[in-house]
Amino acid sequence: MSLSKLVLRSMKKNMKHYYLYFFALIFSVTLYFSFVTLQNNAEVLATVEKSGTATAGFKAATYMLYFIVLFFVLYANHLFMKRRSKEIGLYQLIGMTKGLIVRLLAVESILLFVGAVVLGILAGFFSSRLFAMVLLRVLEKEALVTMTFSTEALQQSISVFAILLVIVLVQMALMIYRVSLLSLFSASKQADERVKRFSPLQMVIGFLGLVFIAYGYYASTKLFDINSQGNLTLNMIIILATTIGGTFLVFRFSVAFIMNSIRLKKNGHLTVRDVLALTPIMHRMKGNAKSLTLITVLTGVSLGVTTLAYISYYSSESSAYSRVPGDYVLLEDKDQEFLKKLEDNHIAFDKSDFRLQSVSASFSQLLSKEQQNKDNPLFGLEGIIYTIPLSDYQQIVPEASVSDNDVILTNYGGYMAEMFPLEKDRDVVVTPGGPEVPKEETLHVKDVQHESIISGTVTAGPGGPIFVVSDALFEKLATYSSASEWHKQTSIKIKNKSDLAQAEKLYIQLNEENYPNLIQSYEEERKGNIESLGITIFTAAFLGLAFLMTTGSILYFKQMSEAEEERGSYTILRKIGFAEKDIMKGIYMKQAFNFGVPLIIGLLHSYFAVKSGWFLFGSELTAPLWIAMSCYIALYAIFAVLSVGYYKKVIRGSL
């Protein structure tokens, strides 16, 4: 029989095992080709060039995507080679040399890669327009995107996947030449490590794994706590080491020990569900601890990065409002031309005027006793805090009231409020007009609010604190003060939201006339945030999808291999009278553990990682976190359902 006939017969026989691997490879090529095509799409680059991050974002995404594809293909190829080890051993028994076997499998891999690359490039060509439209939708841009075939993208895709093919062929040849004939017949039954009997030491190590993870979670909650001592980089390394090491120990010992304890409590009275679930889980998870740890860590990392990127994008509106608290903000009295234009165009609006008076104060006076230490950046820091009179503040909070030297601290939010929370019922000594004026007043902070009312330009950054003082105290402070840099802010809110588009045109027109830049637009600020973050969320989402396809596919491949190895057990169970539904009860439990445990631990890893510093990326946590986690849970559930379906097919064919 010729080599070509052997290749065709072998591929036909193994096609049922390769179909998801083939699909995942096509999907990887599609994503890669689409990203490279977007880099060379003139319409897209012309539209997003103002963001300044398009080219760098796409290049970073393509490098990361290639790393993901490389990891997936090498790992999947290793699994399939183990699965076909008995077949390779039979080839050697009938007289085929290792060189001939390598050529046989090399031809198979080349045909598989060529087919995947061709189909992936075709799919990428048609889907690149869809990806471009999604990107522009994320950036809230309007542009006509045409389908263009990029020869540069074609050459780059063929080059990188040709290199990947060479790496796969080298891996395959090394695996065949290094193993003995006897080991080939048992390779498919070998886990990552040999499973030994349980001992008290293993129980202790398994418990330590849980302790390590718990410590890593606890340390992550204190990572950005200003009261915590130590180097930030060192603390991050410790958190990573304890979390990843603890995850390995949990898979290696903890889960297996728990399953073994449950089995021993049954005193030998095991149901068919116990036989098909408890025992395989106990040994498989223990034996495959390395791969499960890697899958869990990759899931946690990809979900964490995706969530943080989505938090930034999701918080673009609130971040814009913290800097521009109104549809428009005017920073000087003389900037009334914009209001006149609104009136001339019959655009109704509400106006709130805020008088501003600066005082100098030490922020450390507002910190808690625990935070008043030399390691706190705010300790002893003198800065400018603006005050506004109560009557102005009552325009937005009518029920507010202060008297004498009582003040309300408001406008304080963002990451500063999370890292350096200020307390109420504290006295603070201020110097009106700055430190050069030798006059002091002692103010009592009655309450702390976080609502944005003053522009971030005035407070030298969004979330800067503002004191609301009584009108009498405001006038008193003004008598000691020299002129402030900012002395008035006018916040404009358009009554009819349908007039916003026309108002924005008037605002843009004033800017084009070189009008002094003393008017701020919330919509312009929001769109600026969208443009700067759109590329990030776009690339993070697709890279997260690629990571998820990788980890989910690997788990599915491992379940396919286990199902084939256990086919004989299912045959025995069917012959002695167990129905398919009885066997499937154990399979459901087993698959819930195989997919659920890595997913749950990965979700916990990402949750605590995101929770430790999410406020550095945006102002919203709950919604972005739940949306990202829901997507991962749904896609993992799809792989779990596919694996259950494959088990059902194996069980039905076991007789």
Image: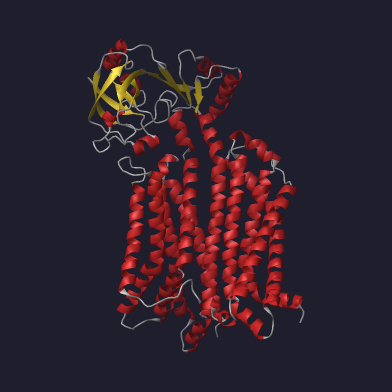
Say which of 557 and 525 sits in front.
557
Residue 395 horizontal side relative to residue 647, left or right = left
Residue at 42%, 30% in the rendered image: 462
Residue 187 in which image quadrant: bottom right
Residue at 76%, 75% in the rendered image: 4
Whole-percent x and y of residue 653?
Answer: 57, 81
**In the depicted structure, whether residue 213 falls above or below residue 450:** below
Residue at 31%, 17% in the rendered image: 435
Whole-percent x and y of residue 619?
Answer: 42, 39
Which quadrant is the N terminus positioned in? bottom right
Q: Is residue 150 visible?
A: no
Whole-percent x and y of residue 121?
Answer: 70, 55
Type of colouring: secondary structure
Residue 405 horizontal side relative to residue 162, left or right = left
Residue 325 in which image quadrant: top left
**In the depicted structure, whether residue 510 falls above or below residue 635:** above
Q: Is residue 13 visible?
A: yes
Say which of 107 and 605 sits in front.
107
Residue furthest front in the image: 178
Say which of 608 and 142 sits in front.
608
**In the depicted structure, whether residue 632 falls above or below residue 174:** above
Residue furthest bottom in the image: 576
Which quadrant is the C terminus positioned in? bottom right
